[in-house]
Image: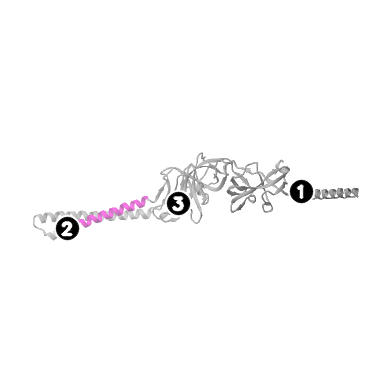
Amino acid sequence: MKSRFLVLVLASAVFFSACSIEEKKAEQKTIKSVFAIYPKSKDGETTRVFNALASANNQVKLSFKVKGNISKLELDIGDEVKRNQLIASLDSAPYELQVSQAKFGLSEASVAMKNAKSNYERVKKLYINQNASTSDIDNAKAQYNSTKAKVNNIQKQLDYIKLQLSYTKLYSPINGYISSKFVQENENVNAGTPIVLISDKLVDEVQVQVPDVLINKLKVGDSVKVKFTSISNDKFDAKIKEISKFTSPNQKTYQVVLKLENPTKKIKSGMSCEVYFNLLKDLKSVVYLIPAGSVLNDKNGYFVYVLEKQDDIYQIKRKNVKVGNLTNDGYEIISGIKDKDLVLKAGMSEVFENMEVSLGNKKELGK
């Protein structure tokens, strides 16, 4: 009887032992395999690139102050010009005719004034000798003053017409080159119509439009990099010279003017370029990049899941993080993680904190 009972106990022990092993195997089979990555360091920098145009520090758009027909405009885009060099001329014949007419009118008025003055002097002597009445001398004086005023008026008209005649010639106020040409010879133009754009010989500025969400991260004096792909692969050093206080028309962007520190003659006004802004240059901590899908957000803020090793398995742990900008390479993580943290790459909705998982890409991570 005892031997039968012992056999039964041993059989039961074997049975339950086998069940325990099977349960452990089943538990091991249910451990989820996940993929993780190491954060990519950005060395405390983040760069934004914007398209821009080179511009001369001193640009002058020339126009005539009077209307007329362009009789001379022989310069072309790219031509070098000197200060006070003649740029263009209008047909001056209409203004020369007006000068001639004004001179003739002035001559007639001067003769009339001379005669009126002589008559006034004559009547004044007669009045002194009581040979002319008060009304006679008053009339003579009024006539003289009237002709004198007419002479002054015509003289002013002549001076104004001569000034207009001088405006028929357009001169360069600076040394530079023709960067734009808006009209051609024999065209009729009104006063103020742009004729040419003259730029400094050395182009040392860049104009770029920056979105309103980033403008407050910039300040005058900040260092930036500028790249002209049409010149070389080198980047030019520059500093922010001006930041507009107002948005550009119909856009939520602000114009920022950069001063190139090492300009060359190869840079031409209007040449396209790329501007590289370092927007996190003042941060002392390291900034990391992780995929956008790895960053979660709830009422407590942004966080990521990291894998902490426990014996031969890993446990899911939450880490709160401070995020920066969303880039093409993912979110910028300003604080909260380290370069050795294993950050869960995907499947965040299928895991929870303290959940045991296995690492599915050990070879990729060198583990």
Question: Of marks 1 and 3, which one's residue comes earlier in the chain?
Answer: 1
**Which label is found at residue 312?**
none
Q: Which residue sits at x=61%, y=52%? A: 297
Secondary structure category for the residue under label 2: helix
Residue 131 point in image, percent of width and height? 9, 58
Q: Which amino acid type is shown beneath numbered disc 1?
A: Gln
Marks 2/1: CA–CA distance = 129 Å
Residue 263 point in image, percent of width and height? 51, 40
Q: Which amino acid type is shown beneath numbered disc 3?
A: Ile
Q: Which amino acid type is shown beneath numbered disc 2?
A: Ala
Q: Which of the two residues, 154 or 350, is positioned nearer the viewer here?
A: 350
Magenta span dominant secondary structure: helix
Q: Is residue 239 above or below residue 212?
A: above
Q: Few, some or many C-alpha atoms within 10 Å of disc 3 (few <14, some 14-19, many ≥20)?
A: many
Secondary structure category for the residue under label 3: strand
- In the image, taking residue 318 as reference, residue 311 lies left or right, namely right
Q: Is residue 171 magenta?
A: no
Question: Of marks 2 and 1, which one's residue comes earlier in the chain?
Answer: 1
Q: Give the magenta part as a residue range.
A: 137-166
Question: Of marks 3 and 2, which one's residue comes earlier in the chain?
Answer: 2
- In the image, taking residue 293 as reference, residue 97 lies left or right, namely left
Q: Nearer the viewer, mark 1 or mark 3?
A: 1
Which residue has dot 3 on it? Answer: 195
**Which label is found at residue 28?**
1
Q: Which of the two residues, 226 or 345, is positioned nearer the viewer here?
A: 345
Q: Few, some or many C-alpha atoms within 10 Å of disc 2 (few <14, some 14-19, many ≥20)?
A: many
Q: Which residue sits at x=76%, y=50%? A: 27
